[in-house]
Amino acid sequence: MKRDPVSFALLLCSSAALVLAPACASMRPPAQNDGPALSSEGVQLAVLQQSCTQTKETERPNSDLAEAIVEVEVRNPAPEAVTVNRTEFRLRTPDGFALKTRTWGSAEPLVLKGGETRVFEMRFMSRGSLECSRELQLDAGAGIGLGGKSIRMKPVTFVPATMAGSKGETHSAG
């Protein structure tokens, strides 16, 4: 059987769109957001959009698999460069868990020149300690540096949203 190259390309593109579209469409502003955090140096940290999915594990009670993807914006109004070390960021839960990022390439520092703004995503995953219906905090910790010193700023507090605007997005498995 001979394949038509145009039909094959259309099939491939359609399949890719079906696989990738849900990931793109799921990012949305949080249901609640305390707004950006501001350091005394003027550096700003904000949560612009997020996606949070939680899979109820019927065979493993209290061990739901959850993933939060957070779109973060860092603004650097300072004249000197700011370094963002994403591995230092933590997603804090109301129960006291501090989740490390699971973002591909997060070990590479981001350098923002004076006056530059950068938007990037961070991915967090957990089994049992992250709940999409509860308040979360993105804490930069020692992850933002200016002039060789860490900048201190309060965490950005937010509650994830679903497509309909309700808190959390839950799926069942098992």
Image (tube, grey):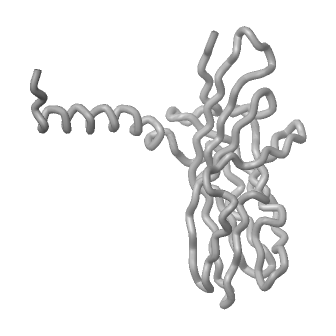
Residue 110 x %, y %: 64, 70
Q: Which residue corresponds to the image point at 83% horizontal and 66% vertical from the top-left?
A: 142
Looking at the image, the residue that sits furthest to the bottom is 79
Res 125 → quadrant: top right
Pick the residue in front: 37 or 84.
Answer: 84
Q: Which residue corresponds to the image point at 61% horizontal and 64% vertical from the top-left?
A: 73
Q: Which residue corresponds to the image point at 84% horizontal and 45% vertical from the top-left?
A: 98
Residue 162 x %, y %: 56, 34
Horizontal side, residue 22 vs residue 80: left or right: left
Looking at the image, the residue that sits furthest to the front is 1
State whether residue 92 is above or below residue 172. Answer: below
Looking at the image, the residue that sits furthest to the right is 96
Q: How many marks?
A: 0
Quarter of the picture containing the N terminus is top left
Res 61 → quadrant: top right
Horizontal side, residue 129 vs residue 9: left or right: right
Pick the residue in front: 34 or 21.
Answer: 21
Residue 144 x %, y %: 75, 70
Horizontal side, residue 125 vs residue 121: left or right: right
Quarter of the picture containing the C terminus is top right
State whether residue 149 is above or below residue 5. Answer: below
Q: Which residue corresponds to the image point at 64% horizontal and 32% vertical from the top-left?
A: 168
State whether residue 3 is above or below residue 120. Answer: above
Residue 172 x %, y %: 61, 15
State whether residue 110 is above or below residue 27. Answer: below
